[in-house]
Image: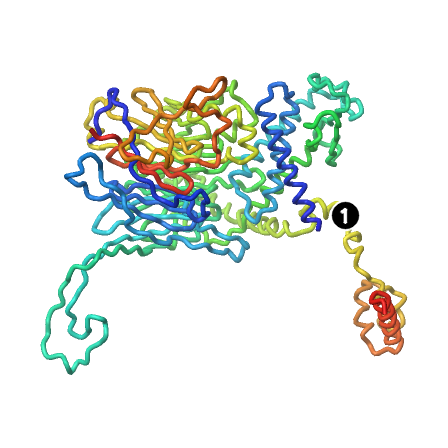
Amino acid sequence: MLGRGLKRKLSDYEENMAGLSSAFDSSRSLPYPLKRQLVLNMCLTKLQTYKMLVEPNLHRSVLIANTVRQIQEEMRQESSQQPVNICPALAPASHSYTGMESPGISLQLPSGGGQQESHCCDLRSVEDPIENSLLIVSDDDMSSAISSILKDLDFVEDISPPTCLVPTADDQPKFPENTGLKLEDDRQDLKGAECVFGSFEISNSTSYLKDLAIDDIFEDIDTSMYDSDFCCPPLMPPRSPSLATEEPLKTFPSCNSSSANNIQICRTDLSELDHIMEILVGS
Amino acid sequence: FLGAGGGNDIQWCFSQVKGAVDDDVAEADIISTVEFNHSGELLATGDKGGRVVIFQQEQENKTQSHSRGEYNVYSTFQSHEPEFDYLKSLEIEEKINKIRWLPQKNAAQFLLSTNDKTIKLWKISERDKRPEGYNLKEEDGRYRDPTTVTTLRVPVFRPMDLMVEASPRRIFANAHTYHINSISINSDYETYLSADDLRINLWHLEITDRSFNIVDIKPANMEELTEVITAAEFHPNSCSTFVYSSSKGTIRLCDMRASALCDRHSKLFEEPEDPSNRSFFSEIISSISDVKFSHSGRYMMTRDYLSVKIWDLNMENRPVETYQVHEYLRSKLCSLYENDCIFDKFECCWNGSDRQVEFLSLCTSDLPNIVMTGSYNNFFRMFDRNTKRDVTLEASRENNKPRTVLKPRKVCASGKRKKDEISVDSLDFNKKILHTAWHPKENIIAVATTNNLYIFQDKMN
């Protein structure tokens, strides 16, 4: 269900971007920071899309990452020249945006480094449709987007290492270093392996999962059967100290024991279930 | 011998078109590479479905002196199959990225074809005779009862219908972690190089179980990666020299005699950026998509998104000539970035040449010197280095009357569109010509649209 919703949103976004990029190309009056923001958003969207691919294109990823770095550097330099942190509410006072008349606009300048609020804010303006579609992105987000896509491209090297020519006296000093470097390479490859598998971790997946707390994900699963009220009776005294540290789920095997209490509990549940079924079926 | 230049512009005529007619393009039929062999008699194409189709030129007919021989299908074979890398859970595309012919040494023809990961050496041989008259076998292959044999005879070869067979002779696998973008055969005809995004390997044609790594630009930490290799080629005469181009618009010339690992270049060719043309997309459009040495080896040509540049190997700081392929796209870069067209990899090629004449000639400017490259809307461009004139032509079935000269096309960048001009906004960016090839000796060109192959010849009087 969520997948479908995401898809719709993406195609709307794509249509929007097509309109925006032709606006970029044709309009001379678009202020530079806005153009830059537009390009940045396009880059990050592409990188995000590539992350979802099984095998992103290395050439394109590098080119896009470089563009993001370039914009990032430019923004950093600009912000280092403007020590005052510009608050969203005071946007009309910002001198970077002299070209824009619309009072509803408030764009947050990323101020680089640690001062930055790290969340993405989607600011909307009723008047200007261009700002409506722009995501304001922080410096940290840019760096992490570049890092993560490039890390994921670090493949585990499963090939046998190419045979090196036997080093002769004439070879440049770099060559003997190669054998030493090889160990580091192996270590790096291991790191690469971790990175490849790292993308399977929840922490690297889409922001949807990042935003939710772990508990929320399991909200819809009914765990009432495993609540401690039901499972405490079967606890056997010698095991109780270790059991106290065990997770609730681990008491499940004890529910299968032939304790009379348990059977009674299960039977109660079953009759309740029957009752519910009767209501549903309407008999 | 090509007619000397000096003002006689070549007039190109449609000759043939190969491929399906309907607009619905099957993905597997998308042409991914085109290459003439060393004599020009054979023309090979590779497609996204992993197939290689070879066309052969008919022997010139004395009665048909108005046109050169036509190209007809000679051999078709499946070069690469889709593979699955179980370790990384990745599908390996069967698309043929490049084909390179070996010079002919005997009756058979050899070519190298490569997909993203594996290079294969194919032998294409003809069989037009077969042995007949075995003593122990019947004509249909059944074995005879030896007791019925009363006389012995020597089997003889008798003619049969021509059969062209392609067989894989070598498979060079497991040497590339990243996607192979180039292969280039050395002038020693014994070794060749293969280049992927980060590494270049040197192979011996006879040895498949190992290769030498000669360039490695992979950083220790992938997060520091800012540049990839986009193309590589051996020098046509010097067997220890090769060049490779990068996504940052630089070309490095390396000498394998200098060290085992050619991470240090001998020469670095780079043009400083024009500040007036600076944009967010400057780096992306500077990425070089193809590099080709001239036949003499004195020059090399590079193709980036908007231009073709000619470099003199003796001058590293800037190209000697720059030709704008479709400058009108400079104001559309954001849209082209959005729809990914900005990443299209156009190839380029030199006109054919008679190398002996080129060497002997004291004044090479008399020899025709033309470079060709593709564009959008099924347009392709030719730049004459001698006359400095250029022309835009179109590969389209509408112009398919043989011996009719192709009409030059013109794109209207801005302002009022003249009659017969096409405006930039009407260009079809799905119709791109990425692959072109020029016959090594004659004025015959092969131009690949998405799924069709066009052959054009110059008008013979």
Q: Nearer the viewer, residue B401 or A118?
A: B401
In the displayed image of the protein, which residue is found farthest to the bottom?
Answer: B147
The residue indicated by pointer 1 is A212
The answer to whether A100 appears left or right of A270 in the picture is left
Q: Residue at x 58, y 51 (%)?
A: A193
Query: Above or below — where is A203 with respect to A258?
Result: above
Query: Above or below — where is B358 with respect to A53?
Result: above
Chain under numbered label 1: A
Which kind of residue does numbered mark 1 sit on? Leu
Quarter of the figure with residue B184: top left
Q: Nearer the viewer, residue A99 or B208?
A: A99
Query: Above or below — where is A121 with respect to B171?
Result: above
Where is residue B383? Give x, y as percent: 35, 25
Q: Nearer the viewer, residue B70 or A51?
A: B70
Quarter of the figure with residue B257: top left
Where is residue B199? Give x, y as percent: 45, 43
Where is residue B284? Give x, y as percent: 52, 31
Q: Nearer the viewer, residue A152 or A48?
A: A48
Task: State the scheme by which the image is colored.
Answer: rainbow
